[in-house]
Image (cartoon, rainbow, N blue to C red):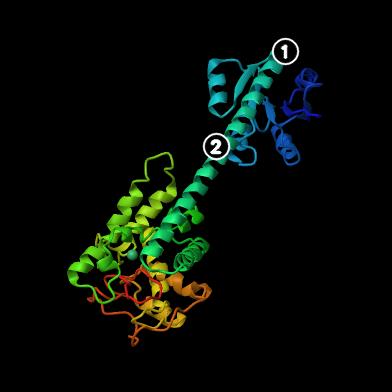
């Protein structure tokens, strides 16, 4: 199999040096010549070399300035650069290396030595490339495996909580829509620009994981919870964070575990501090929790329960808008209202009511009912028992 020769770009304003370098490299490499840094940059628009041999002292743009520009541009930052120069002081060499050069060779140089050093750097570069590919593949495998575990855990929660599939998929989509709109408008950009949106959506699956630790007599209670039972129900937030926290710090310690933990802990906090478990308020409520609240509440409001009809999309939007600045982050509420018509309608409104429907969400001091109360709902599937809390 023919192996294409590596490409070397040689940059020097001295034609004698260019000819000398070319004669050293010819036969082993495909050589591209530039008599100045500006000409090198122009050439880089057409050719991506495997390595650049760069003179230091050149008119207009010197070698040190040229490497700064190379390293500042994502398209050229990874091209290894070797300085080839008559400046042979230790200070010059240190400066060249500190600017990102992989080597510093002083003139005059022997052809054999130049070739050996180029060969070594190209080998290191190839090794690093292979290593990075391997790391990317392994990371991708870990993320896929962890996503599968998250899916499984989410299914366990849905099964235990008597919630049909669909809630988790919908809330993931709602969060994705909110994040896209936030990015478009630049809202909370310093935070979300560091986030992988897909991982944030994955993280949201486990917001109610802590319900696996809630007793059936409470979780599946068909009627209203007593204040004591509701206090135990509230603990699904801290239980969830504790369970997810056990996955932190191990070999699969990835960002979305941290996001999932925060969502589980804070999805019932409120902007006005009346939520739980921490009673946090304003921006002290982590952004993940503030986001999750929209998806969670909207889906619960538009879901039919044994004790209530599903609210229409416009009714749910109206109810959430009334919670601007009390239950919900006001700026996020504005985003929600801007894009609410993009939120996908539920495909299945659920089965017929088991009893007479009750209108809308319950009052704020009613721990047994969901809605714009101190207990935003954890959405549930239609079924025989009303259990949104
Ligand atoms: Fe919840």
The x and y percentages for residue 72 are: 58, 39
Q: CA distance from mark 2 to mark 1?
A: 35 Å
Q: Residues within 10 Å of mark 1 (few under 14, many from 20)?
A: few
The x and y percentages for residue 70 are: 62, 36
Residue 23 to residue 78: above or below: above
The single residue placed furthest to the bottom in the displayed view is: 356
In the image, 153: left or right of 367?
A: right
The residue under label 2 is 135
Q: Is residue 286 visible?
A: no
The residue under label 1 is 112
Q: Nearer the viewer, residue 300 or 259?
A: 300
Residue at coordinates 45% horizontally, 69% vertically from top-left? 335
The answer to whether the residues at label 2 and label 1 have Cβ atoms under 8 Å apart is no
In the image, 58: left or right of 157?
A: right
Q: Is residue 64 visible?
A: yes
Q: Quadrant of the N terminus?
A: top right
Residue 143 to residue 123: above or below: below
The x and y percentages for residue 267 are: 34, 63
């Amino acid at each position: 199999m023919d192996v294409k020769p590596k490409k070397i770009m040689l940059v020097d304003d001295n034609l004698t040096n260019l000819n000398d370098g070319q004669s050293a490299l010819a036969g082993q490499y495909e050589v591209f010549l530039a008599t100045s840094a500006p000409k090198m940059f122009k050439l880089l628009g057409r050719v991506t070399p495997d390595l650049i041999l760069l003179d230091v002292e050149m008119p207009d743009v010197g070698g040190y300035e040229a490497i700064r520009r190379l390293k500042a541009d994502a398209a050229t930052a990874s091209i290894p650069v070797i300085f080839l120069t008559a400046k042979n002081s230790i200070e010059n060499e240190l400066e060249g290396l500190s600017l990102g050069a992989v080597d510093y060779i002083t003139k005059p140089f022997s052809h054999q030595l130049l070739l050996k050093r180029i060969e070594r750097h190209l080998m290191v570069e190839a090794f690093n490339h292979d290593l990075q590919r391997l790391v990317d593949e392994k990371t991708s495998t870990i993320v896929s495996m962890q996503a599968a575990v998250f899916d499984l855990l989410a299914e366990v929660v849905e099964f235990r909580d008597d919630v049909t599939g669909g809630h988790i998929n919908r809330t993931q989509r709602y969060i994705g829509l909110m994040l896209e709109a936030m990015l478009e408008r630049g809202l909370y950009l310093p935070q979300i620009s560091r986030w992988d949106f897909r991982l944030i959506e994955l993280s949201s699956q486990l917001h109610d994981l802590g319900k696996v630790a809630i007793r059936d007599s409470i979780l599946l209670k068909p009627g209203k919870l007593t204040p004591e039972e509701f206090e135990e129900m509230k603990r699904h937030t801290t239980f969830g964070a504790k369970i997810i926290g056990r996955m932190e710090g191990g070999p699969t310690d990835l960002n979305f575990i941290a996001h999932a933990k925060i969502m589980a802990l804070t999805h019932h906090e409120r902007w006005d501090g009346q939520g739980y478990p921490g009673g946090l308020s304003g921006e002290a409520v982590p952004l993940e929790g503030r986001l999750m609240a929209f998806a969670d509440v909207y889906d619960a409001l538009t879901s039919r329960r044994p004790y209530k009809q599903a609210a229409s999309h416009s009714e749910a939007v109206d109810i959430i808008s009334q919670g601007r600045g009390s239950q919900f982050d006001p700026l996020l509420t504005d985003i929600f209202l801007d894009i609410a018509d993009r939120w996908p309608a539920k495909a299945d409104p659920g089965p017929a009511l088991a009893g007479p429907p009750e209108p809308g969400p319950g009052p704020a001091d009613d721990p047994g009912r969901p809605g714009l109360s101190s207990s935003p709902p954890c959405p549930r599937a239609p079924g025989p028992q009303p259990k949104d809390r």
